[in-house]
Amino acid sequence: VFSDGSVWPSVRVEEAWRDGLDAIAITDHIEYKPHKADVSTNHVRSYELAESAAEALGILLVKSAEITRGEPPGHWNALFLTELDSLGTNDYRVAVKSAAEQGAFIFWNHPGWKQPFNQPVWYAEQAEVYERGWLHGAEVVNGDEYNALVHKWCLEKNLTMLGNSDAHQPIALDYDSPLGEHRPVTLVFAREKSVAAIKEALLARRTAVYTQNLLVGKEEFLQPLFQGSIEVRTPRLTIKNKDRVWLQVFNRAPLNFELERRQNLREVTIPAKVTLHAGKTSLISVTGRGAGVTGERELVLPFQVTNLKVAPTQGLSVGLKAQITFKK
Amino acid sequence: VFSDGSVWPSVRVEEAWRDGLDAIAITDHIEYKPHKADVSTNHVRSYELAESAAEALGILLVKSAEITRGEPPGHWNALFLTELDSLGTNDYRVAVKSAAEQGAFIFWNHPGWKQPFNQPVWYAEQAEVYERGWLHGAEVVNGDEYNALVHKWCLEKNLTMLGNSDAHQPIALDYDSPLGEHRPVTLVFAREKSVAAIKEALLARRTAVYTQNLLVGKEEFLQPLFQGSIEVRTPRLTIKNKDRVWLQVFNRAPLNFELERRQNLREVTIPAKVTLHAGKTSLISVTGRGAGVTGERELVLPFQVTNLKVAPTQGLSVGLKAQITFKK
Amino acid sequence: VFSDGSVWPSVRVEEAWRDGLDAIAITDHIEYKPHKADVSTNHVRSYELAESAAEALGILLVKSAEITRGEPPGHWNALFLTELDSLGTNDYRVAVKSAAEQGAFIFWNHPGWKQPFNQPVWYAEQAEVYERGWLHGAEVVNGDEYNALVHKWCLEKNLTMLGNSDAHQPIALDYDSPLGEHRPVTLVFAREKSVAAIKEALLARRTAVYTQNLLVGKEEFLQPLFQGSIEVRTPRLTIKNKDRVWLQVFNRAPLNFELERRQNLREVTIPAKVTLHAGKTSLISVTGRGAGVTGERELVLPFQVTNLKVAPTQGLSVGLKAQITFKK
Amino acid sequence: VFSDGSVWPSVRVEEAWRDGLDAIAITDHIEYKPHKADVSTNHVRSYELAESAAEALGILLVKSAEITRGEPPGHWNALFLTELDSLGTNDYRVAVKSAAEQGAFIFWNHPGWKQPFNQPVWYAEQAEVYERGWLHGAEVVNGDEYNALVHKWCLEKNLTMLGNSDAHQPIALDYDSPLGEHRPVTLVFAREKSVAAIKEALLARRTAVYTQNLLVGKEEFLQPLFQGSIEVRTPRLTIKNKDRVWLQVFNRAPLNFELERRQNLREVTIPAKVTLHAGKTSLISVTGRGAGVTGERELVLPFQVTNLKVAPTQGLSVGLKAQITFKK
């Protein structure tokens, strides 16, 4: 409520705890205070009023603000600030510079916002901030929207990928959990659970973004996430001639993995598409091709996980290992 | 947020719309403003700030306040106020009187609150306000608690029964809809959808209370609710000797009805307990007793609906009609 | 189990009752009895063994069989047979003719089955049976597959559209209801609940097909289904200049309706896409264009329901009426 | 279908796989073959017809039968048989003896069945079979019924506790998974996944029974199950004077744990009742009593888990460890 939100700051902490998050940032606009007739405009009050709830529930709270200007240059979030008042200037360069000098992690919010067809533009202002080394990341996902062009830029320009709720209302009004919806989150691959470690990981670009049934990130982060989520429960199979057997694959992750076959194999036929259901064991048929193969082979079944995006149009390449004994 | 809540007033309207309500009252404490360091203490701001959302979504908004004193006399809600400032006095009698003179509907909130074992006490203060004709109702249900003694008093003293959320946080943090929980509501049997009609019905005691899997109210209101919710889909049955046949009963209500047999019948055996599942058709077995009955009879199967309470320990008595042809 | 299924015939009746069906046909293969080493091959036993359960639960049971030959001519189902033994001949023409002479309703099962890319072929055999007047319908939906070409043929050749489970296992193993799946069903627009009335409606082509989140049928059947399912809860709106107001539309059907705008209106802007959620009230924004319109107008908001298919690539055209008063 | 069931034997294997089971026994009645007019009465056909599905899905299949006589002596299941035909005798002693001589694990099915008020009776027949060493276990749970007296007998007479579905129909018709129901299962604490290891564990009485929201078993099995299911996520707490802090406890099990306080503590107040929700982290309030305690203490919060029954009226005693620093 201290900016254009509609909940008391401590609510954000309890919602975060309910959703299983480790850390949140409340990024009230510095310049936009539509409730000012009724509510204090003190920039740091949100942080102060959320602190005791955060401590009680073990949620890390990051002191943050949103620097809000027209488009260009658009809106920026600055995380890990030490003080917020110096951001309240007329010149956005001064505000961003102040944040940068505080060692903040600065990223571009919802770059496609108010742009035709939601396509972001890399204006001179972005270029300038980026070249000064002040721009560290961008929202690949804002609310329920994934932006392919921002994803591409993050890869090309080495920006940290972020996925944020941009929640103004209670989370439950924006994301309908009985329908299976959830808020987007940034997975931060930090070395420990501390504000400092999260900052280090964000500056080092070690993130992935999780939204609805989609994970977005670099191969180096998504590959271990996938491999750590699945378990082949029947690693040894025996196939007689053209028989069909089943590879059982358990998926411990909370999202389905949508697999597509990357190529055909000489020894066996595998399905063109398979879904590994969240929290369940799924079956992948493996059918002998009767091509005179005999003896034991280790096959790596080649799939692409289409909803684990390593680039805007590229799913994660994975292999599922199976030790198969072929018999006549 | 204008009292001890944690959401902006317009949130309450959207939550109400999502939950399918027709009307709400935001009853900020007059005397208790824990956010006053940051938020205006203007009593009527909640109402004003919720008005446009209410109009846009078609939710009726009732101008209201909570008169909050120690125990006794406890807390009172006054609905349908015309102005709120006169309630801000030191003497609770003056505040209640002012509300009464405005024609408000006044009820006792959470009577068991802070009393040993949650058992309310009818203090001299309650007696006085009641005898002056200022007390019209009481909360039989507050949050997730049903209070049997308040229920009894409402019947004995002719008070309107109310069930209220007493929500301070976002509704979704208090009631976990994925687990099947819902906020309590007061069903008001008004003649039309208007603030005036709701007031008339409340003053005339025409309500029932719906909480979790429980409906509380007088027989005259619960009987038509039950009868209007169920439909016997196989009203004609044929029983040969001791055969068992099935009465199919559809329950269009959103809550299960828990039925217990009230008495045995001479002609047929019916089950001791049956659940009529919400939104589904359930089966009630009807088994011939082979007692030499023949020909067509209209039987009224005698049950009590234990989760439709017409008194603290009494469920609604109902009869399910079946036209049964008995054959040898 | 009397053919290649895996449940006792009475199970089909109870499953049908659980799913809320009115009528079923058990269409065991005449020619294919893989369990014959253990189970009787009497064609009519399935019907006989399901009869008492059907009577007890009020499910209509249609005496039926599947005439199973290679492709061409493929598989045919014959419903409303009086006896089944005469179908057990080597010549499929004799079998189909016998069914036709019994007055059966005959349709082509899963026409795409075993054809390249699942595309059915209208072989000479189909042409012959069709021209003799023996072919009355075809499966637009078999199991979880909708076949666009069959849909087109049904429209061109005036065939009854059918959607069938083709269940062999317990229904719950084929359709995972906790995941929201349901078996396909044929909606038969019969004049009463009787076997005769269903037969009359099937022969008269009065059906639609319901599968997952899709309804397939002629405009004359889908239009009243849609209009009877929705209710505009705020039929009167007032728009000042360029304000945005909300049309509230309740959808009582068990499937979402996916709406797309068919054209733009001069007076107001309506969304390009809207989902009317099953069992819920959804909001459709209506925004004034400030084009100098004043006074009261009846507008018909033009949408297409993309998941109500009147042709393979054409959704049902619908209009939502709103009485709008425009103000400056 | 080979006895009084209504599915083909292979269905049981697929259902078991869907439910995540490791092993099943199909225990067709030896003496009761109501489908014999249509279906083979070969005792071993169920086993034979389920074998290939079991191998394909990795389900262990136990060769078994039910010895079915009047009451007394009631019905017995014999598992791990080598042949079934010798059980088809008129004298139940001969049948049980034959099973015993085959090394079978023999248990008493649904002991309360057809007894007044479902209370089992330990007839002379039971005593005899038990004293001969032929009776190894009994069904504490059959279908959806837990039997307290059988539970007591298992403890007193050192019988293996079993919980079995006794399914005749498709599992999904008996247990409504969308409503959260599941079939009862016997948890067998075997040393490996093999038929021999399961047999060894059953004979050694190493089981627990899981039904709906209830686990039944000896303390030695339930204690590690509970301790392995929960994780205290905030093992270190700091309490100032009478402050309230929160112990966060994650429950990885698929059932809620219902905790009741066993005794009061001198240092802190803990709640009388807490539910640890399945798959979620729950909060347990810990409130300082301001009794002058200072410094660091390891407290073991004493609860009883009422739905983990170690005896008919006794829940499992557990302690939740917390390292608490008390400050003034």
Image: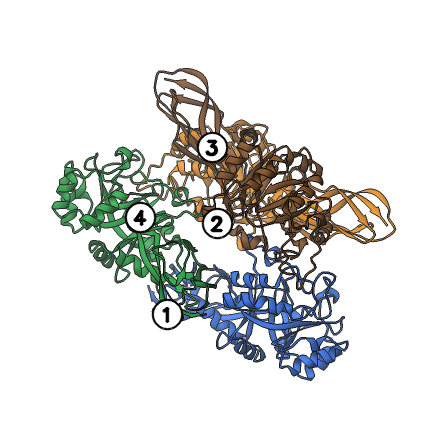
Chain colours: A orange, B green, C blue, D brown
Nearer the camera: disc 2 or disc 1: 1
Frontmost of labels 3 and 4 is: 3
Judge whether C313 appears above or below A21 on screen.
below
The CA distance from mark 2 to mark 4 is 29 Å
Q: Chain of mark 4?
A: B
Give the CA distance from mark 4 to mark 1.
Answer: 62 Å
> Which numbered tag is attached to residue A178?
2
Are the residues at dot 2 and dot 4 in contact (C-beta closer than 8 Å)?
no
Q: Position of residue C70 (x, y in %)?
A: 76, 70
Check disc 4 and report the residue beneath it.
Answer: B49
Q: Amino acid at mark 3?
A: Gly
Q: Which residue is mark 1?
A: B297
Q: Which residue appears at 46% of the width and 47% of the height?
A: D116
Q: Are marks 3 and 4 on the same chain?
A: no
The reply, left or right, for residue C212 in relation to residue C248 is right
Badge 3 vs badge 1, beta-carbon distance below 8 Å? no
